[in-house]
Structures are given as structure tokens and as C-alpha cells.
Image: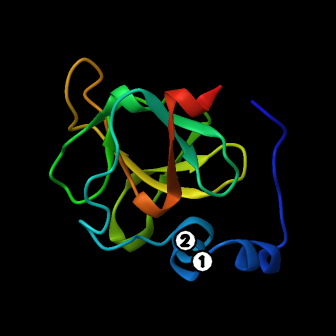
Amino acid sequence: MADRITRPDAEWRELLDPETYRVTRQAGTERPFSHPGFPQGPGHYACVCCGARLFDGDQKFESHCGWPSFSRAGGAIGEHRDTSHGMIRTEVRCERCDAHLGHVFPDGPPPTGLRYCINGVALRFIPESAAG
């Protein structure tokens, strides 16, 4: 993994649009179904904040939950216990820049049984042809 990226809060506010800042830097959640038609296939999904590789395109699946879902992490993913909102969940963050991405749940498809439920504004799709 590349070197860790840290920026002052004011710099993140300048670099990101308000919704992306709220989700990635303040652990927010976007509205469900706000990113229909996310690409799937050859390529990968990167962190919108720092460009770190997070998920391979072939791990994306349609979970009908309202957010992009992946069956396996393919890169710089860190997991943390989240007890906010009166629940116990596993939060998913970018290991490179600490961006909040979403949560992982044990109700995904085989063989992992995992569903990484990720905010679409936290992701950028990089087609295989552009991945270099």
C-alpha cells in the first residue's frame, strides 16, 4: 500500500463536494438507490478521496439494498467496530486516508458470505483499460 494520506479538515472540505465530504470524512450515509447503474466488470473501484484500490469490479453484485455491494475486499480496506445508532456493526474505512466507506455484513453470497455495503460517493470506477 502507498504511504498514508492525512490532510487537515479544511483541505478535505476544499477537495470534496459537500455530500462526499459528509459521507467520507464525517461517517455519513448517502440516500439508498442514489447511484443506480454503477459499472461492473473489468476494472476496480478506488477511494474517491485518495485513489487507493478498494474492490475489484468482478466482486460487485446486486444486493438490492440501495448501495453498491461487493462480496470481497480487493485492496486497502480496514474494518472497525461501530456502535453508533444503537447497533453493533463493522465499519469499513480506506486504510490509506481513513475515509468512511460503509459497512460489511455477514449476509452476502458464497463463497465469502460477506456483503460490503459501500456508499457510492466514496467510490470511483477505474476501467481495466485505464488501470495501467
The residue that disc 1 covers is 17
Looking at the image, which is closer to me, 98 or 119? 119
Q: Residue at x 37, y 56 (%)?
A: 88
Q: Amino acid at mark 1?
A: Asp
Please tell me how crowded label 1 is: few (under 14), some (14-19), or many (20+) other residues with Cα within 10 Å: few
The quarter of the displayed image where residue 58 is located? top left
* Most foreground residue, 13 or 9: 13
> What residue lies at 47% left-to-right and 72% top-to-bottom?
28
Give me the C-alpha separation between circle 1 and circle 2. 5 Å
Place of residue 13 in the rendered image (x, y in percent of width and height, measured from the top left):
71, 79
Rendered position, 92 above or below 59? below
Task: Tell me the kind of residue under disc 2.
Answer: Thr
Residue 39 visible to an observer of this rendering: yes
Residue beneath disc 2: 20
Instruction: Give coordinates of residue 81: x percent, y percent.
Output: 49, 51
Which colour style is shown? rainbow
Disc 1 + disc 2, Cβ < 8 Å? yes
Using the image, determine if residue 59 lies above or below residue 121.
above
Position in image of residue 106 (x %, y %): 27, 37
- On the question of residue 71 being in view, the answer is no
What residue is drawn where x is 33% and y is 63%?
A: 87
